[in-house]
Amino acid sequence: MAALYACTKCHQRFPFEALSQGQQLCKECRIAHPVVKCTYCRTEYQQESKTNTICKKCAQNVQLYGTPKHCQYCNIIAAFIGNKCQRCTNSEKKYGPPYSCEQCKQQCAFDRKDDRKKVDGKLLCWPCTLSYKRALQKTKEQRRHLSSFSRAGHQEKGQYNRLGGDGHYNSQKTLSTSSIQNEIPKKKSKLESITTNGESFSPNLALDSPGTDHFVIIAQLKEEVATLKKMLHQKDQMILEKEKKITELKADFQYRESQTWAKMNQMEKTHKKVTEQLQAKHRELLKQAAALSKSKKSKKSGTITSP
């Protein structure tokens, strides 16, 4: 009986081939909890629910420091403290100031000499390094698959010939082989057109090392398009946030302006009322003063005529 291994999520036991490499998850857990990229730091993590779009570390930082800003180096929305994300801050302390990335051309590539060996000596930033490594891994898997397929085809053909296969089978194999050979130049010309039209991507990528070929170029182009789409989406989000902030500021300004005018009108009314009251009191005092003056004059005239 074949040995069974436990899934790291649901802890049910499955054959080793049924579990994913690395995290050792079964098929149902891989579907329910896919590996996605964090909205902020772009680190891959296992998603607990569809509403959870940020990793646990960023969730803790949001609670402590609030919503992050764009990093001044890599432009990733992960700067919780200051204007730099934690990754770029640590890299700057360890490797010095950043250089221009050979892939995305942003000033966010740190000279990690050990990592450069893994990407054919190229000076790449962290996101482009991950993309390059994924492309190399896909190429190795495709080569391994093609190699195993080729070996299986040769073994099958040899076994069939030993068993005395008829001419109809051999003609089908010959036709299949010729069709594959005819298809290879088409794919090659299509690849050359892709690399020729890709202005933002280095066409010499496939010539830099024997470890990279047209699969790497196609994967890199896809990664670059995805990165550009994400950057465009981030720019759109920034524009929407700024427009929202401008609208809020305008509304706040109009509210404050209306409040100020209302307060000025109220003060003007109060001042006018107080002025009228003072004027009325002043007139009353003038009347009283005139009456007193008149009474004094009458008393004086009475004292003079009495003898």
Image (cartoon, rainbow, N blue to C red):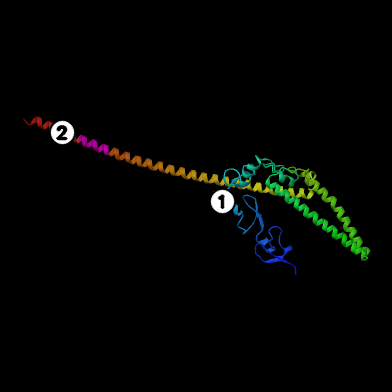
Q: Residue sitting at 80 percent across and 55 percent down?
A: 144
Q: Where in the figure is residue 9, as x and y percent of width and height? A: 65, 62
Give the residue drawn at x 66%, y 46%: 231
Circle number at residue 62: 1
Q: What stretch is highlighted in magenta?
A: 281-290
Q: List the residue tagged with mark 2.
A: 296
Give the left or right position of residue 172, taking residue 99 as reference: right
The label on residue 8 is none
Closer to the camera in the image, 194 or 164: 164
- Picture quarter with the C terminus: top left
Question: How would you rate the neighbour count of disc 1 (Cα within 10 Å): few for under 14, some for 14-19, many for 20 or more?
Answer: some
Instruction: Please check the rendered image and state whether residue 284 is part of the magenta-colored stretch, yes or no.
Output: yes
Taking the view exactly as shown, the residue that stands out farthest to the bottom is 1
Q: Is residue 278 visible?
A: yes
Chain-order first, disc 2 or disc 1: 1
Under mark 1, the amino acid is Val
Residue at (43, 42) in percent of width and height: 261
